[in-house]
Amino acid sequence: MIKVLFVCTGNICRSPTAEGVFRALVEAEGLGDRISVDSAGTHGAHVGESPDRRSAAAARKRGIELDGLRARKVRADDFDQFDLVLAMDRGHLQMLNQACPKGREDRVRLFLDFAPDLGISDVPDPYYGAGDGFERVLDMIEAGSRGVLAHLRPRLG
């Protein structure tokens, strides 16, 4: 079982969206029994909360359900439990690298490194924005998710 963890700030917008999108992609490919997905936040302000309603609504329009997901904070054992710990932006990457135990650094990566054609490094936080920010984030997350799956395929045999 390959385990993937998506990480943003509060685990209510970007990372649960990535969890939902990636899980749907994995299921559509028939790999749900071989790849496990979760999400977490670098901060604990929203622990136990559902994803932001705007994130959930944007995802639902694309057939992705975020119902049942609850925010949690990154734990020390996540670096042992997950094969990939994917930061939504460089700030998260820096925090994760600081918290990462020695010998596990290779598991921590920047999510959009798996979507180099986008030409950007960070998935922007749509929380305080207006307009189509959640839709743009979904586009980026879909591209990154396809790249992560392509990266993992060789390990699946």
Image (spheres, rainbow, N blue to C red):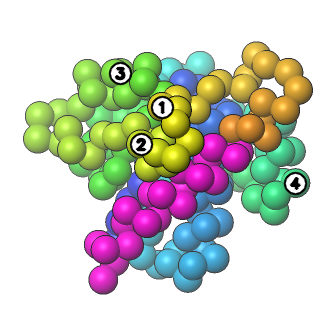
Query: Mark 2 belongs to which amino acid?
Result: Asp
Q: Which residues are magenta?
A: 138-157
Q: Say what secondary structure mark 2 lies in.
A: helix
Query: Mark 1 belongs to which amino acid?
Result: Ser
Residues under labels 1 and 4: Cα distance? 25 Å
Residues under labels 3 and 4: Cα distance? 32 Å
Position of 32 relative to 56 (above/below) = below
Residue under numbered circle 2 = 113
**Most common secondary structure along the magenta stretch:** helix
Residues under labels 2 and 1: Cα distance? 7 Å
Residue occupying image coordinates x 73% and y 51%: 66
Query: Mark 4 belongs to which amino acid?
Result: Lys
Which of disc 2 and disc 4 is earlier in sequence?
A: 4
Residue under numbered circle 1 = 121
Task: Confirm or deny contact between disc 2 and disc 1 (CB under 8 A).
Answer: yes
Which of disc 4 and disc 1 is earlier in sequence?
A: 4
Q: Say what secondary structure mark 1 lies in.
A: loop
Position of 21 relative to 56 (above/below) = below
Residue under numbered circle 4 = 61
